[in-house]
Image (cartoon, helix red, strand yellow):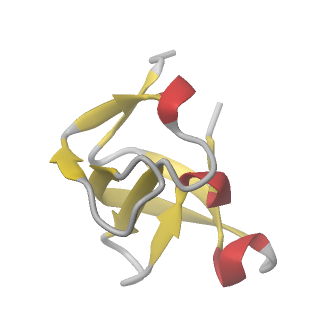
């Protein structure tokens, strides 16, 4: 199992800032924000960096985005 989150990976995602039911989504974009509004686009990031609002991802299959705290790795 990879220790990195990559574009194209499927993840578990909770919309509503983490309050909605869990859904599966495909990562289309990844930004490392360091907690700020915008950040640097990357193709992959280590899962240890995916927490709180340090990372923002957007999804290709549902036109939503999420903070790192809203997604979980599918094992």
Instruction: Return the x and y of residue 34 as percentages of the image width and height.
Output: 42, 46
Q: Is residue 75 above or below residue 31?
A: above
Q: Residue at x 30, y 52 (%)?
A: 30
Instruction: Return the x and y of residue 5 as percentages of the image width and height.
Output: 41, 35
Q: Residue at x 65, y 60 (%)?
A: 70
Compared across the picture, whether 16 is left or right of 19 comes to left
In front of the other: 17 or 12: 17
User: Quadrant where the C terminus lies?
Assistant: top right
Q: Is residue 57 above or below residue 48?
A: below
Compared across the picture, whether 35 is left or right of 33 comes to right
Q: Is residue 58 above or below residue 20?
A: above
Instruction: Return the x and y of residue 71 as percentages of the image width and height.
Output: 61, 54
Instruction: Return the x and y of residue 36 as percentages of the image width and height.
Output: 40, 61
Q: Residue at x 65, y 54 (%)?
A: 69
Q: Is residue 45 above or below residue 53?
A: above
**What is the quadrant of residue 18 in the picture?**
bottom right
Q: Residue at x 36, y 56 (%)?
A: 27
**What is the quadrant of residue 53 in the picture?**
bottom right
């Amino acid at each position: 199992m990879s220790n990195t989150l990559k574009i194209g990976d499927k993840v578990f995602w909770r919309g509503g800032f983490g309050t909605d039911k869990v859904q599966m989504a495909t990562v289309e974009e990844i930004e490392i924000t360091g907690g700020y509004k915008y950040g640097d686009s990357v193709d992959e990031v280590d899962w240890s960096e995916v927490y709180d609002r340090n990372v923002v991802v957007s999804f290709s299959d549902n036109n939503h985005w999420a903070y790192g705290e809203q997604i979980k790795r599918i094992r």
